[in-house]
């Protein structure tokens, strides 16, 4: 494999770890825990793994003798920078406990466990991937590990390879399933421990004990670099409004963090739009008013950040999508037989009066995306809807009207962007490289101490790495009951942007000034070598959240 000079230099980087992980480790167990809500129902579902204590690794004095252990690892869901370092951390951790331990990687996600596709991850393979982005060491996949049949198929290969512990690196759903699997194997006495690791660039797997999911730091820094470059460009030519959609599925954490980093003219936060019950027209008017105001100062340019999941948070759009789903679920075949040029008119007729009005006003491409791109469950795939185009076009139309009404005197030309895949496999920042390696090493420690049903946790990460606190959090502690496919199910609670939280309040306090003044920040590329204030800063979101937490201590 040919490598760039940076890759070669980066391969030698030694991730920083909590001081406690460097020496002899023992565990301290806290009080027994409870789920965030629905305690009785969740305890019933997890009789073996509910209520376990929080675990903290502390410095020990007596060296424990560990037997060799075979461990399996799975990367689940969307890529996130740092996954390779989690695997390197697990590898080094189990080898430090006993050099005869072995690590197996299941290929292309949970499907690899079910279909018995695996490779042994040896030292030479691991060394190739240290501090690199991507999940390509073993690949990832979105197969959900949720049925007994799958668990049993998995057990066959785990037994064959004598694997005593499985680490599942994934988001909230994958970790929920990791917990179900841990419970199943515990109940069965299968002798397989299951440990989770918090991954997702979306940043929505976080809570009291999990400060952040890995990958969020790097992805936001990559997007912020590029948005900063765009801001320099638009401040140079002064002729375009850039509409930039950012990944993040539901929650707006990525958009919010990027806004804090680059100080754009506009950033929409889905959670706020839902809370204020805003319509698409309200959003269009909000943007158009800022465009008009900036035009008064001769600034016919700007940036608008749009969270990927926006459309589903606009209450009226949510209703429209719901009705479209219902209609298409029942009449898909009939709809497909209609001539393409008549399809939109046909569906408009079938919708309720309110929804048909909204649908008829949508640009044709977006209306078509809403009718065509549905997932296997019959839902519209909101991530494929070009919200950035929708907003740019509708703002353009509204400004034409405002011009006639004498409310806009200026020029409006727009460009659209979608940043998502550009950042998901970036080489991890120092923060993510260190955090991920520590998460992996901690997962190995939890295995060494015989734990199951835990998520690897590394906290206090705004302090220097030596002061980070490593341990384990019972996954059941993060759960509540939610309706899924019509039934109430125990799931890890997803973290949306809190409107009373510090990161949003900081943004809200500045956004009116950022809208009108051109006060852009150009963060530049991630730096791996150099002064600590340049290379080792965590996200602004995390810094604000940690400050708030410690103020309340
Ligand atoms: P995870 O929740 O699995 O971490 O994936 C997050 C994500 O990157 C979202 O931001 C995005 O909406 C989605 O994956 C895209 O999925 P895909 O990779 O299947 O196109």
Image (cartoon, rainbow, N blue to C red):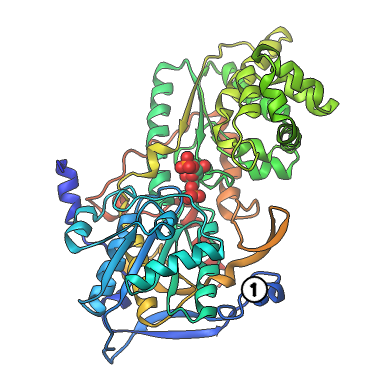
Query: What quarter of the picture does the N terminus occupy?
Result: top left
| Image: 382 above or below 485 | above
Q: Secondary structure at mark 1?
A: helix
Q: Residue at x 56, y 14 (%)?
A: 412
Is residue 5 toward the left or the right of residue 367 in the image? left
* Disc 1: which residue: 45
Crowd class of label 1 (few under 14; some 14 to 19; many from 20; radius 10 Å): some
Asked whether residue 416 appears in the rendered view, the answer is yes
The quadrant holding residue 310 is top right
| Residue 401 position by quadrant | top right
Spot occupied by residue 289 in the image (x, y as percentages of width and height) = 66, 23
In the image: residue 353, left or right of residue 529: right
Report whether 442 appears left or right of 213. Answer: left
Quadrant for the C terminus in the image: bottom right
Q: Residue at x 68, y 16 (%)?
A: 398
Q: Residue at x 31, y 48 (%)?
A: 136
In this view, 369 is above or below 27: above
Q: Nearer the viewer, residue 29 or 233?
A: 29
Instruction: Give residue 267's position: percent from left, percent from top.
Output: 56, 36
**436 and 244: which one is in front?**
436
Q: Quadrant of residue 512?
A: top right
Residue 212 to residue 243: above or below: below
Residue 146 appears at what percent x and percent y?
Answer: 55, 61
- Image coordinates for residue 151, horizontal then vertical, percent: 50, 66
**From this viewpoint, which residue is outermost toward the bottom?**
62
Q: How many marks?
A: 1
314 over 154 or under it: above or below = above
- From the viewer's perspective, tell me whether residue 395 is left or right of residue 157: right
């Amino acid at each position: 494999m040919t490598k760039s000079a940076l890759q070669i230099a980066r391969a030698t980087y030694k991730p920083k770890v909590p001081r406690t992980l460097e020496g002899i480790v023992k565990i301290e167990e806290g009080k027994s825990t409870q789920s965030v809500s629905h305690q009785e129902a969740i305890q019933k579902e997890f009789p073996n793994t509910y209520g376990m204590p929080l675990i903290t690794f502390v410095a020990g004095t007596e060296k424990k003798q560990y037997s060799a252990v075979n461990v399996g690892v799975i990367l689940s869901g969307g890529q996130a920078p740092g996954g390779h370092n989690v695997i390197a951390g697990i590898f080094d951790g189990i080898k430090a406990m006993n050099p005869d331990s072995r690590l197996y990687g299941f290929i292309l996600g949970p499907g690899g466990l079910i279909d018995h596709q695996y490779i042994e991850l040896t030292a030479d393979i691991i060394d190739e991937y240290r501090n690199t982005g991507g999940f390509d060491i073993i690949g990832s996949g979105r197969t959900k590990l949720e049925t007994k049949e799958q668990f049993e198929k998995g057990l066959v290969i785990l037994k064959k390879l004598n694997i005593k512990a499985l680490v599942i690196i994934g988001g909230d759903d994958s970790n929920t399933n990791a917990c179900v699997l841990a419970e199943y194997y515990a109940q069965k006495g299968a002798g397989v421990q299951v440990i989770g690791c918090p991954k997702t660039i979306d940043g929505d797997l976080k809570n009291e004990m999990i400060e952040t999911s890995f990958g969020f730091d790097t992805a936001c820094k990559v997007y912020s670099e590029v948005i900063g470059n765009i801001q320099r460009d638009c401040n140079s030519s002064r002729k375009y409004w850039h509409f930039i959609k950012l990944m993040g599925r539901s929650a707006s954490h990525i958009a919010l963090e990027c806004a804090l980093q680059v100080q754009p003219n506009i950033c929409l936060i889905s959670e706020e739009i839902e809370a204020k019950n805003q319509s698409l027209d309200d959003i269009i008017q909000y943007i158009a008013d800022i465009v008009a105001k900036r035009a008064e100062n001769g600034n016919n340019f700007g940036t608008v950040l749009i969270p990927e999941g926006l459309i589903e948070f606009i209450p009226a759009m949510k209703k429209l999508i719901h009705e479209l789903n219902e209609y298409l679920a029942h009449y898909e075949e009939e709809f497909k037989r209609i001539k393409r040029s008549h399809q939109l008119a046909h569906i408009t007729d079938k919708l309720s009066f309110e929804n048909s009005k909204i649908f008829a006003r949508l640009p044709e491409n977006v209306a078509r995306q809403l009718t065509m791109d549905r997932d296997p469950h019959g839902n519209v795939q909101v991530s494929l809807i070009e919200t950035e185009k929708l907003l740019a076009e509708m703002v353009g139309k509204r400004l034409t009207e405002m011009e006639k009404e004498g409310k806009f005197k200026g020029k409006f030309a727009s460009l659209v962007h979608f940043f998502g895949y550009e950042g998901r496999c970036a080489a991890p920042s120092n923060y993510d490289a260190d955090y991920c390696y520590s998460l992996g090493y901690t997962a190995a420690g939890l295995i060494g101490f015989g734990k199951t049903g835990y998520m690897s946790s590394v906290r206090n990460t705004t302090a220097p790495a030596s002061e980070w606190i490593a341990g384990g959090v019972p996954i059941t502690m993060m759960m509540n009951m939610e309706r899924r496919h019509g039934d109430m199910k125990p799931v890890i609670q997803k973290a949306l942007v809190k409107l009373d939280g510090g990161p949003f309040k900081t943004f809200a306090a500045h956004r009116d000034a950022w809208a009108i003044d051109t006060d852009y920040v150009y963060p530049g590329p991630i730096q791996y070598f150099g002064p600590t204030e340049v290379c080792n800063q965590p996200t602004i979101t995390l810094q604000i959240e940690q400050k708030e937490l410690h103020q309340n201590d």
